[in-house]
Amino acid sequence: MESEYIKESLRIKGFLDELLANKESGEVEFKSAKGGFPGSFWETYSSFANTDGGVVIFGVREKHGIFSVDPLSEATVTDFKKKFSDLQHDREKVSLPLLTDKDIVSEAYGDGYVLAFFIPRATRDQRPVYVGLDPMTGTYRRDHEGDYRCEPSTVSQMFADRKNSEVLQEAKILPNYNWDDIDLTSFRQYRTLFTNLIPSHPWAVLEDLELMKKLGGYRKDRVSGEEGFTLAGLLMFGKTESITDVACLPDFMLDYRDIPQDTSKTRWIDRVYSDGTWECNLFQFYRRVLPKLHAFLPKPFVLKGDERQEDTPIHEAVREAFINLCVHASYSRSPRLVVEKRPDGIVLRNPGTLLISVPQYYEEGHSECRNPSLQKMFGLIGRSDKAGSGVDKILEGWKYAKWRRPYVSEKSHPDVVELFLPLESLVSDTTIGELKRIFGDGIVELPHNEIIILSMATTEEEISNASLQNAVDLHPSDLSKLLRKMCNDGMLIASGFGRGTTYRLNRGNVAGSNLANSDVASSDVASSDVASSDVASSKKTLTHSDDDNVITMIREACRHQWLSSRDISLKIGRHPTHVRRIIKKMLENGSLRQEFPNQPTHPAQRYHNV
């Protein structure tokens, strides 16, 4: 969550008005606070800190599902700030103080004030953040229904995920396991790959046991003197029955499915799972599934020197995503890794939670690994990077293909991280043709991000900084600068002010004139005589066509899961206003259903394909 972005936005009345219109969400919660400092605040404090952060706003009340501002007095705001500061540092109230003075913002609204607490996501070493003295009963997390108390096993996993945890789960020594539990074929194949890639590496000549020690698959405990194969060693090279033994991971499962367009006749057209025909370990799963994912990716004719380059940035991106699935999974609870190839994209699910926030996931250089030994094993065969560039490679690969940006999300009950790699182009031929007609053929020479912004502006009534953040790889402040530049260059027209600014395509530049020579760069198309009825007709046809595309994308996104309108917007890369309009149309024609049909405005409303 971009707390600084929202804090700045709060100073504009329109921001709070928008929050009121959208009701509560996973990142925002309102509390009246007229009866005193709400005791339930601390549960929300814990849940936001243990999830993705959020903002709690005092001075807003709810009645019959309707939210309205119920402002606080200046004296109440002052009293609440002091009370919060005292309680935050009371160890018996909450385990950790996270907020500073700059994270608490009061703002005049109506005849009083609203008070906002911007709660950041706690780091992996700070989690769990809990209420009271017992983490097993006082730890909360957030989902679409609000705050919920974590199960003891979830709390234990948070403690295990800490960097300073006594022993990482993957380093756990498995008693009474020996070489009979290792699939020697897998280990030999791995050694061959490693030796061929780095023949001069000093580990290449080590005996099997010594190499296994270097990889982290076998270790000796310096305190107890116990030694043996580790969980990491079994996960990578173990035999199926040894991994799934009650002494290891009885629920362990690796599953790949190729989902067809029409699932009414068959659920999948290809599947790789533990069917007894292969040793179900991570290395063999990698060898069997990755080629299937690579097989349907485009292979453009690109030369590297005198040889054709088969391994394109797209292939590298899929490989990094697959390895991330393995090395970032939490294997202690529901250890099931799932890969699905769908007509609209690739879905990869691993058990656990993100060790960094979603915004950090998209930023360069952030790397927190749950299973460093597994990361080392894949890294030595050239398939993993410890520098935090794995996600960068995924994003660059999709940018290279001009596909929609990958979308990562966290789900709970049980905890799952899902990465969706869409196989849909951000810029269709129809959109490029429309942009050429407005701005001239030279438009295709613009930088990638500008093309993406223009393409979205072509099919949306309006765009904004917030609606573009899932489509371009820029920080919100840098995106604002680019949008201003595009307005100055005559490509976009801005409306509103500050964070409430929206943009639309400057269609006044029609008839193929060059941007540099445009006389209507800063004019509003509504007042421009250049816009013709032909352009209006073209826009109508394009919008209608895009509505059909959005309906198709929403149906695919909601085919296998319930999603909120916000999640749908992020997943398909469309403006929330546009998505809500299409959802309404789909509800009317019966092609979409609500999770709470008797409460259409339910704050946790989600949708599913019929």
Image (cartoon, rainbow, N blue to C red):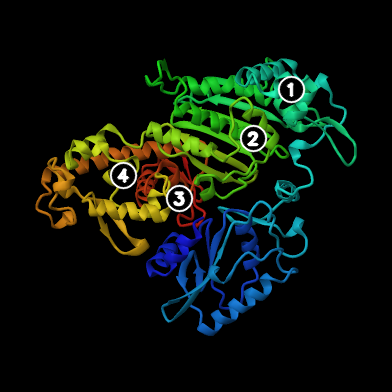
Q: Is residue 460 above or below residue 191?
A: below
Disc 3 designates what residue? Answer: 566
Q: Which of the pair 178/136 is nearer the observer? A: 178
The secondary element bearing badge 3 is classed as helix
Disc 4 designates what residue? Answer: 450
The amino acid beneath tag 1 is Thr
Decide if residue 425 is in sight here: yes
The amino acid beneath tag 4 is Glu
Q: Mark 1 or mark 4, which is nearer the start of the sequence? A: 1
Marks 4 and 3, how far apart in space? 24 Å
Q: Which residue is rendered at x = 48% and y = 62% of the image? A: 4
The secondary element bearing badge 1 is classed as helix
Marks 2 and 4, how far apart in space? 35 Å
Q: Position of residue 541 (x, y in %)?
A: 21, 39
Looking at the image, do the residues carrying marks 1 and 2 touch, with CB atoms under 8 Å apart? no
Q: Mark 1 or mark 3, which is nearer the start of the sequence? A: 1
The amino acid beneath tag 3 is Arg
Q: Position of residue 156 (x, y in %)?
A: 75, 49
Disc 1 designates what residue? Answer: 240
Q: Mark 3 or mark 4, which is nearer the start of the sequence? A: 4
Q: Mark 2 or mark 1, which is nearer the start of the sequence? A: 1
Q: Which of the pair 197/312 is nearer the observer? A: 197
Q: Position of residue 347 (x, y in %)?
A: 52, 33
Q: Which residue is rendered at x = 68% and y = 37% of the image? A: 372
Disc 2 designates what residue? Answer: 327
Q: Which of the pair 462/206 is nearer the observer? A: 206
